[in-house]
Amino acid sequence: MTGRTTAVLHEIYHRLLAHFGPQHWWPGDSPFEIMAGAVLTQNTNWSNVAKAIVDLKATGKLDPAALAALPTAELAELIRPAGYHNLKAARLKNLLALIEEQGGVEALLAQPTAALRELLLGVKGIGPETADSIVLYAAGRPVFVVDTYTHRLLVRHGLISEDCDYFQMQELFMDNLEEDAVLFNEYHALIVRVGKEFCKKSKPDCAGCPLAGVGLD
DNA sequence: CCCCAGGCGTCCA
DNA sequence: TGGACGCATGGG
């Protein structure tokens, strides 16, 4: 871990941390809240997800047993503010089935990292980012989470090509950083933070970004 | 009015 | 295998 890519990835992290400070992710009180939030935030602004989570909490439904007893159509209405509510209600139900089958949230999250990841990927509606978000932020395992902001950032800083896939991006980080869940937690959160502010599709110039020039010769 | 958001599954060539 | 498309609400 002494190459140029390693150095650039470290520099990006340290600049982001210096500029934004720690992000304290995931903003959830329990592992199950994090798991549900991971599904609800698929292609969705967090402010919309937060409304749905507030409603779930207010009605006492942010709990595996309570949600399992709730008809899918009623669940969909509760999470309406998060968008794609019919789709996400079904996905949450699918996740609940896995939790039940594994004997509860704690037992599921106690599975070895690779097994946990595969179990989650087996749930219809849970793909690589949602699975890894749960593995990292709910189970605390050192798996790097990649999202659209990550892709955009890596392309703009010349670290990957446009057609790079999820696993290649994940490997890039995991091959060049210490295997540390706290570091991976903060790094992904910081990428989302800088993405929201400076790395938008509509701002190809990245004006004002604290990463200006990093990785580009 | 427009674009965007912490993806994923399906369909079709 | 890979590119389009549907899913939906709320904010700027």
Image (cartoon, coloured by chain):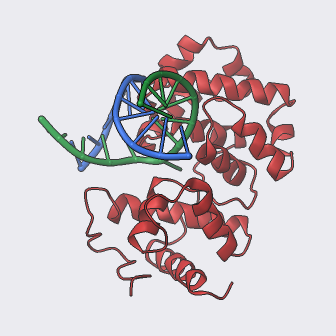
Chain colours: A red, B green, C blue
Q: Is residue A138 visible?
A: yes
Residue A200 placement (x, y as % from top left): 32, 58
Residue A56 placement (x, y as % from top left): 56, 27
Q: Is residue A105 above or below residue A190?
A: above
Indicate left or right for A216 with A174 as reference. left
Q: Is residue A61 visible?
A: no
Image point (66%, 88%), residue name: A2
Image point (25%, 56%), residue name: A202
> Which quadrant holds the N terminus of chain A?
bottom right
> Which quadrant holds the C terminus of chain A?
bottom left
Q: Is residue A15 above or below residue A29?
A: below
Image point (42%, 37%), residue name: A48
Q: Is residue A11 above or below residue A162?
A: below
Residue A45 placement (x, y as % from top left): 41, 43
Residue A42 placement (x, y as % from top left): 50, 39
Indicate left or right for B12 with A178 as reference. left
Image point (81%, 52%), residue name: A113
**How many numbered marks appear?**
0
Quarter where residue A120 is shown: top right
Tell which of B2 and A51 is nearer to you: B2
